[in-house]
Amino acid sequence: MLHKKKALTLRMNTDFGTILLKGPVTPEQLDELEIYDQLDAFRPPLQQLEALKEIASLDEGRIIVALKDNNIIGYVTFLYPDPIERWSTFKMKNLIELGAIEIAKDYRGLHLGSKLIELSVRDPFMDNYIIISTEYYWHWDINETKLSVWEYRKIMEKMMNAGGLQPAPTNDPEIMSHPANCLMVRIGKNVKEEDRQLFDKLRFLND
């Protein structure tokens, strides 16, 4: 299933100058980069950079970055679901999770999140995968944006739509715990019918 990761690039001309979107990047490439000090949603920036290197070193791990000069100002990660989560129950080798996406506050409003996700799925090999993203409102920086839960949900959904991810029903207790939470899914055109059916079973475990 896994293949040699061929990097894709996209240049964006913005009011901040040229921003380069690139990936999947290797741990060695990440060693040559610095990380913007506002990328601290999950852990302190330097620790986050180390975490990105760890993901990039995984066979299935994919990191797409947005760069201003030599600085990472945004990123999106793809990797297998956490072994303790329901999404790894069947150990599907073609099920990959959009694990995290973060954009530095100074560079928001440029649609970098959407562009990163769009670039991520431009690799034809991603059509072999079922991509999921679990959206929980308590992970959203609602206080920072001053948006309501539903306004933020609409933004997240639009951003995921850029990569072809659509809301999908599930009986997962965490997602069902709040109506703004959702499971976003993109099923690649090369995914076999038996894997689609297995994923349907996964979405409604014990139903």
Image (spheres, helix red, strand yellow):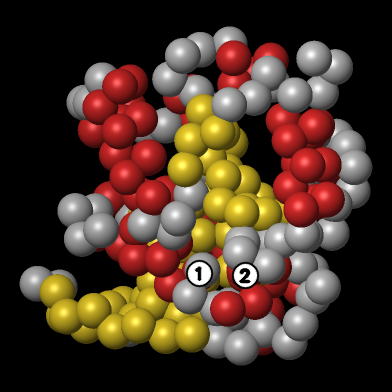
Residue at x 35% of width, y 30% of height = 153
Task: Check if mark 2's residue and mark 1's residue have beta carbons within 8 Å.
Answer: yes
Q: 28 or 46, which lies in front?
A: 28
Three-letter code for the amino acid on which mark 2 is drawn: Met
**SS at mark 1 in the image:** helix
Closer to the eye: label 2 or 1:
2
Residue at x 67% of width, y 54% of height = 130
Relative image position of residue 204 (x, y in whole percent): 75, 24
Residue at x 61% of width, y 61% of height = 188
Q: Which mark is residue 126?
A: 2
The image shows residue 63, relative to residue 88, as above or below, that is below
**SS at mark 2 in the image:** helix
Identity of the residue furthest to the front in this view? 193
Relative image position of residue 36 (x, y in whole percent): 39, 64
Which of the 4 image quarters holds residue 42?
Answer: top right
User: Marks 2/1: CA distance?
Assistant: 8 Å
Relative image position of residue 39 (x, y in whole percent): 43, 54
Which quarter shows the C terminus? top right
- Is 79 left, or right, of 108 in this rendering? right
Three-letter code for the amino acid on which mark 1 is drawn: Ser
